[in-house]
């Protein structure tokens, strides 16, 4: 079942609601988070509606690798030399939108561990 077809990110991918895009290619897009947690806060999402990492299989390996490389590319594009890449999988981990997304967060010192 295509659980993420009707998420807000599905609507962004279909062009039904606007986003501040910083990258687009055949496999994914990247855009600015509407509630940024740092001076730079981007989201990289696959066009294919995976729910999260738990929903991914071995066949998704090349796509997942591509998403990581795009995360690094858009971080550099924003002038970042240090950043954090986060993927929340599941509600208890903080996932609120059930369409796989990589957060790219930077532009300020980041604390560890996260809450
Ligand atoms: P997560 O909590 O890991 O599922 O992250 C979802 C993220 O999507 C949050 O950081 C939200 O601020 C962000 N978000 C929700 N709706 C939008 C939107 N329309 N455009 C951009 N970012 C969004």
Image (cartoon, rainbow, N blue to C red):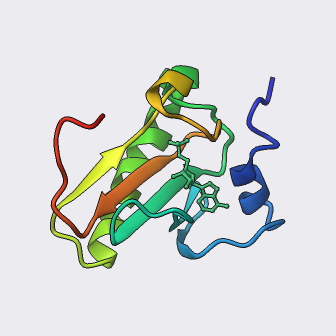
Percent across and percent down for residue 93 are 45, 27
Percent across and percent down for residue 1 are 81, 23
Q: Is residue 5 above or below residue 91?
A: below
Q: At 24% from the left edge and 70% from the top edge, which residue is drawn?
A: 107
Question: Residue 57: in sight, yes or no?
Answer: no
Foreground residue among 60 and 23: 23
Residue 74 sits in quarter:
bottom left
Residue 98 located left or right of residue 5 = left
Residue 40 sits in quarter:
bottom left
Q: Is residue 80 above or below residue 37?
A: below
Foreground residue among 95 and 13: 95
Q: From the image, which quarter does the C terminus lie in? A: top left
Question: Residue 106: in sight, yes or no?
Answer: yes
Residue 62 located left or right of residue 15 = left
Residue 5 located left or right of residue 47 = right
Residue 1 located left or right of residue 81 = right
Percent across and percent down for residue 42 are 44, 63
């Amino acid at each position: 079942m295509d659980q993420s077809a009707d998420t807000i990110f599905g609507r962004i991918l279909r062009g039904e609601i606007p986003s501040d895009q910083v990258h687009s290619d055949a496999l994914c897009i990247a855009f600015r988070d509407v509630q940024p947690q740092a001076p730079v806060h981007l989201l990289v999402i696959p066009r294919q509606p995976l729910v999260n990492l738990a929903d991914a299989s071995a066949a998704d390996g090349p796509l997942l690798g591509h998403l990581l490389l795009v995360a690094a590319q858009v971080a550099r594009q924003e002038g970042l030399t240090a950043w954090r890449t986060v993927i929340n999988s599941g509600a208890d981990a903080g996932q609120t939108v059930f369409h796989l997304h990589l957060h790219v967060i930077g532009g300020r010192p980041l604390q560890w561990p996260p809450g």
